[in-house]
Amino acid sequence: MVKFSQYDGGGEEWYAVSAAAPPLDIPPITKPVERKMIFNELIGKSSAAAMNAFSAKIRIQNFTFSTRDGTILDARSYRPVAANDDRLPVFYYIHGGGYLTGNLNIDDPTCSGFALGANVVVVHANYRHTPEFTYPTAWHDSEDGFLWLHDHMDEFGGIPESVVVGGISAGGHLAASLTLQKHLGNIAPSLPPIAGQVLMVPVLSHLETRLAQLAKSEESHLSSYESNKNANMLSLAEWRATLDLLKIPDPDPRDLRINIMNATLEEVKGLPPTTIGVCGLDILRDDGLEYGKLLAEAGVPTEVHMFRGMPHFFRGFGDKISQSKRWDAVIEHGVKWPLTAPNGTGQFIIKEKQDWT
């Protein structure tokens, strides 16, 4: 266990903004299906309104793709109008939402912003969610979307050798899994290697696996799972309830689709350039930092960005939080940076400001 307790606390801006913000108009529903429906509808309305700012700048195409079990899912591409018909790098984006919520409509503004900011084609493929679909459905769907993307590269003008994969929270989990499985040769070995990965506040292990590992350490009380167990946005109890819907009663520590950070040094050697964003007040903080350290020591070009004093996915509060602009800049840089073929330094550095040197 590596100690990162120096990043505890200090969330004055977050506490001020969250205290003043009105709560989401979601009734206290205990059934996940109903909560998902109401959340998706509510956030979808605000996303539709936000798209007005992008309508003249982004060309959107809608697609469908077939999964390995024959299910038809939706996908969408976002391309800067100013790029005309030029071939562009591709950012394969996988949305978060605790494996429960999220869809294409909710992330329309997010994907449009990434396309413009990084001058890439963003491809967003849907996946099936809990509680109706349990592990490993979302993982398989995300992998199948990746295969479909390569089969239809010409339709949205992408460059096959320049595909960066990324996601936020649970989407970061799926993205990290996809990237590692592709690297290990378990997915589409004939396709070009993934060019980079962007993992923002990612899930990198199953909670029960992680807690069992921490229990063996005399310094487990210093873990972010302890210091941030009652944090806003994602408490320990909320995270356990979220993962329970995946129905993984006895997670295998060596199942690297869910326990990515249990990969060995040899297994991660040769992974593509990686950007990791972590938040100081997030229970998942130390997992992201430890994985970043592992990658750096393995010679993988790695940039780790710390959002001190912020909880899990604070970005949902938008411009009310000063670090939201840096969040967006980190992702846009994380998409472009791997395409410059950076070299690994072997050094593990945690950045707390927008510094791309």
Image (spheres, rainbow, N blue to C red):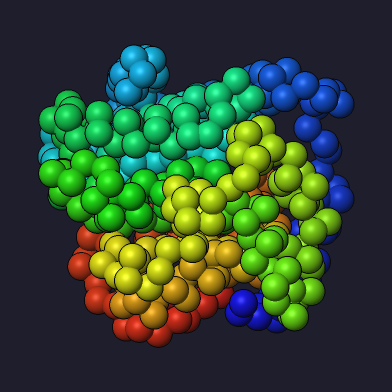
Q: Is residue 10 visible?
A: no
Q: Nearer the viewer, residue 77 or 205?
A: 205
Q: Is residue 294 above or below residue 107?
A: below
Q: How many marks?
A: 0
Q: Is residue 36 above or below residue 122?
A: above
Query: Residue 209: x, y in percent?
Result: 62, 56
**On the image, which quarter does residue 81 sit in?**
top left
Q: Nearer the viewer, residue 54 or 152?
A: 152
Q: Nearer the viewer, residue 183 or 337?
A: 183
Write the residue at 34% across / 15% down: 70
Query: Residue 264: x, y in percent?
Result: 40, 69
Write the residue at 55% across / 40% down: 96
Query: Residue 137: x, y in percent?
Result: 47, 29
Write the residue at 50% across / 25% down: 128
In the picture, the quarter occupied by the C terminus is bottom left
Query: Residue 163: x, y in percent?
Result: 25, 47
Q: Is residue 278 visible?
A: yes
**On the image, which quarter does residue 78 sit in?**
top left
In the picture, the quarter occupied by the N terminus is bottom right
* In-image side of 45 versus 88 (left or right): right
